[in-house]
Image (tube, rainbow, N blue to C red):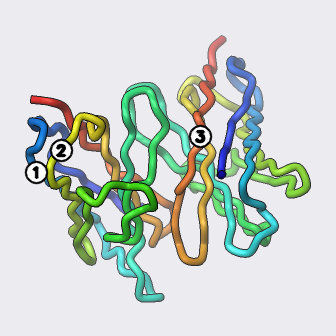
Amino acid sequence: DVVLTQTPPTLSATIGQSVSISCRSSQSLLDSDGDTYLNWLLQRPGQSPQLLIYSVSNLESGVPNRFSGSGSETDFTLKISGVEAEDLGVYYCMQATHAPRTFGGGTKLELK
Amino acid sequence: QVTLKESGPGILQPSQTLSLTCTFSGFSLSTYGMGVGWIRQPSGKGLEWLANIWWDDDKYYNPSLKNRLTISKDTSNNQAFLKITNVDTADTATYYCARTIAAPSRDFDYWGQGVMVTVSS
């Protein structure tokens, strides 16, 4: 199975600060169809996960544009440009290029 | 508006079969490219993908659960189902269903609220 390693495991930020989360894959996530199926999700406390970004850099509808995704092959980054209080929670990367789908271990974003 | 809601037994005993239902609205599993997946999360831990079922009845399972999983659907009633046989305490978790789209690919764009399942003797 593909192992996704997220760093850091915990991130402390102040409101307005920009932060980045890394997701490294044990295998290239570039699919034979040319797409890269790496998504980012946020799980707020007590809530279900929600999709933020799909296929590395595509912003899901309704997600604020302070969220952005980048990367290729095995190294991916989620950036939040100006953290807001509603952004607190656990962020997960997830890959769907290789079976079975796998998730990263999560990065908890908390207020400093 | 897309919504999904999971239902299940709440508590069951080791060795029993867990049956989960996902009732959804706002999309159809008879539409090309649509699918439903099941994901679980033990309390305080991360996410684990279990299975997907697609509009054409293609099914995919997580091999880590070996042959314990069966996913199915009832297109007429907008429902998807997951059965897990021979449960044990390690299956205690919140179980989510989520919509997935094959083309263009967008995995798990809508999630249910989750249903807590406890396996205990």
x and y, in percent, of residue A79 in the image: 19, 58
Quadrant housing residue B117 = top right
Residue at 25% over, 71% down: A74
Residue picked out by circle 3 = B96
Where disc 3 sits, the SS reads strand
Give the numbered dot on residue A83: 2
Q: CA distance from mark 2 to mark 1?
A: 6 Å
Q: Which mark is residue A18?
A: 1
Q: Are marks 2 and 3 in contact (CB under 8 Å)?
A: no
- Chain letter of disc 1 in the image: A
Camera-nearest residue between B59 and A84: A84
Q: Are marks 2 and 1 in contact (CB under 8 Å)?
A: yes
Please name the residue shown 43% across and 56% down the image: A62
Q: Is residue A48 above or below residue A59?
A: above
Kind of residue sitting beneath label 2: Val
Asked whether the residues under marks 2 and 3 belong to the same chain, the reply is no
